[in-house]
Amino acid sequence: MSAAVLHRPGDSPVHRLPAQVKLVGAFVAVLGVVATPREAFWAFGVDLLVLLGVWAVAGVPVGWFARRALIEVPFVVLALVLPFTGGAPHTDVAGVSVSVDGTLAGWNILAKGTLGVLVSLTLAATTHPHDLVTGLRRLRVPGILTTIASLMLRYVEVIVAEAKRMRTARVCRGHDPRFLWQAGATARGIGMLFLRSYERGERVHLAMLSRGWSGSLPAPPAPPVSAGHWCAGIAPALVVAVCCGVSLWTV
């Protein structure tokens, strides 16, 4: 799923926060969710309420996140299977014997996985992909990583468009991807797309070198980030961290 597709433009206070502030906030929030004990059910509920508050301020509807959170369906299936495949001890729930450890393990995957996906979607929805790369650069992430990410964002749409043109050409020549015996043609098309992308990358790199490419992208001027920005951006993550600390202390 492309980051540009996940971005939802807006002019809310969350959208206007500097990208590096939101990156740090999302990182702290995910760490807090992961470190929360699985038995602290109330803490996960508070974390979800914090996310709902952020969505309300950002002006992004809940349904927008719900549709895109379907990417975690495989993990949900695994979480639903664990109560029936876990070991002893067992307990009866509505006349069905389920494993206590398996149920807690499934709940742990479901709660933390869902919250992690929702935090990531919130960051992507309120921050333009190129702003994310700029924020990483301002957080002193190694330049080679930010350069790779920036070029990937710049050319992923080109590769997607190339794949669509190749599929259209195959369909015009009688290819029907709905049939199993057409899998060979699809595999060859994927291989050809890889070769074309590699060749395009070589041409782009040579063009960059001929224009004086020095190995790093120019960084735009960075506006000052005030203490208010940091307080507003980190506050939701601090609530998650406090819930994690309290749950670790009490469980």
Image (cartoon, helix red, strand yellow):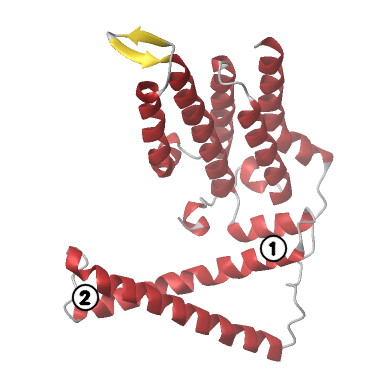
SS assignment at label 1: helix
Where is 211 relative to 88, above or below? below
Give the quarter of the image for residue 28: top right
Q: Residue at x 67, y 20 (%)?
A: 243
Q: Residue at x 82, y 44 (%)?
A: 226
Query: The disc labelled 1 sits on which kind of residue?
Result: Leu
Q: For this view, does 70 lie left or right of residue 115?
A: left
Q: Which is nearer the N-term, disc 1 or disc 2?
A: 1
Quadrant assignment for the C terminus: top right
Q: Which mark is residue 145?
A: 1
Q: Which mark is residue 171?
A: 2
Front-most of 118 and 85? 85
Where is 26 relative to 250, above or below? below
Q: Which mark is residue 176?
A: none
Front-most of 150 and 95? 95
SS assignment at label 2: helix
Q: For this view, does 176 lie left or right of residue 9?
A: left
Q: Position of residue 44 (x, y in %)?
A: 56, 22
Where is 172 relative to 36, above or below? below
Q: Residue at x 45, y 73 (%)?
A: 159
Query: The disc labelled 2 sits on which kind of residue?
Result: Val
Quadrant assignment for the N terminus: bottom left
Q: Residue at x 81, y 48 (%)?
A: 225
**Mark 1 Cα within 10 Å, few/some/many (few <14, many 20+)?**
few
